[in-house]
Image (spheres, coloured by chain):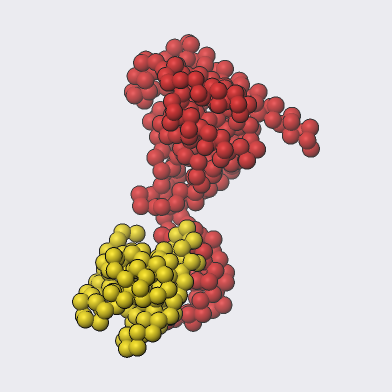
Chain colours: A red, B yellow
Amino acid sequence: MMIVSVASGKGGTGKTTVAASLASVWDGALLGVDLDVEEPNLHLFLHPTIEGSELAYLTVPTVDEAKCTYCGACSDLCQFAAISVMGQVILTFPEMCHGCGGCIAVCPEKAISPGQRELGEISWGVAGGVGFLAGRLRVGEAMSPPLMRRVKARLEQRLATTGEEAIIDAPPGVSCPAVNAVMDSDVILLVTEPTPFGVYDFKLAWEAFTPLGKPLGAVINRAGLGNDAIYRCCQEKGLPILAEIPYDRAIAEAYARGRIIADLSPGVKETFVTLRDKIRDLAKTSQLREAAHA
Amino acid sequence: MRTIAVTSEGPTLDDQVDPRFGRAAGFVVVDLETMDTKYIDNGQSQVMAQGAGIQAAGLVARAGVGCLLSGYVGPKAFKALSAAGVKVGQNLEGLTVRQAVERFKRGEVEIAQAANRDG
């Protein structure tokens, strides 16, 4: 059972394009997961039939002022100033709350009870032979990791019962949401492009994800564009290049129409079949290495 | 009202008003009659990832002042200061603390009805 996450430093390098094409050539039961909850778009390529959805919530404090003695234990604990005693008034800022539940636990008067903040929606369905799972952040919600954790909980539950493998479409960047998306996967793909922007953000992603100790592999999209700095960078860091997708008008047109580019030609399909096999090799090698260390 | 607080880049009346509230360097608490001062360091709020304005509002409220003078106050901090009964005078950047206080004493500082910055 393997989880592959498709990440990048820079946005717009082709994470979703790669995730969708990889899903189309996968040789086993698969769940495609959109963890780019701020701007989910895997569905634009997989065209899933949605079978169900639910709203996800974060536990935030609700204060019963009649019981509150303004002792300040909750405000002293909260690192995010989401609950704050101002003299003889207690204020909550539910939008700042990270949902740790500490204020509820620490209140000596039991004056704080769990309330809810809507995080967004989780939906699931099926796209051809591939399962589909996605999160969509509520407009106005500032934190994406809490919703991502709920999507991942459903993902784990599902893989445990179905034995599917999963491909995760991760958000761009190298901050909490990106790390959250990739941290539980077995292999991390870094999709990049041979431009100065691509190289710069690729290095950031490499730095951010290397400490996770997961096998990393590069996919170079729009190969032929720009210069060879990305190749030198991969070589220096000992990062295997698992696939190169050519900078090609036909591919760009297929992408723009929401098509899976692996369906475009036998050549492109072969690129993704090879990528899939190399991912499996990478996972296997790393498992062997782990076993040897154990 | 006996004392007011002014966001300040330093501890004295002749330091510049810090235009920020939540992440101000500190607050000079001024006795309006004697012009005696006390300084409250705001370093703890400055390093917070979020909620600096709310925490700073707590510091100011505990100092027991009737009014806060600053440059910009955001909506959460404004809500917190209002809850604590601290009035807010804004748009006082570019002055020294002394100049801001004198302007306040002359009745030339308008008491804000709302925050002048988005969260």
**In the displayed structure, does residue A288 sit left or right of residue A227?**
right
Residue B33, placed above or below residue A53: below
Q: Position of residue A138 (x, y in %)?
A: 38, 49
Image label count: 0
x, y percentage for residue A77?
54, 69
Residue at point 29% right, 69% down? B95
Q: Quadrant of residue B116?
A: bottom left
Residue at image coords 61%, 20%: A277
Identify whether A82 is placed above or below B63: above
- For the residue pair A142 and A223, the one nearer the viewer reads as A223
Residue farthest along the top direction in this orientation: A266
Up the image or down, B23 lies above or below B4; here it is above
The quadrant in which the C terminus of chain A is found is top right
Residue A210 visible in this rendered orientation of the protein: yes
Query: Residue visible at 44% across and 76% down?
Result: B39
Q: Residue at x 49, y 15 (%)?
A: A269
Residue B40 spot, x, y in % from top left: 45, 75
Relative to residue A102, is residue A127 drawn left or right? left
Q: Quadrant of the N terminus of chain A?
A: top right
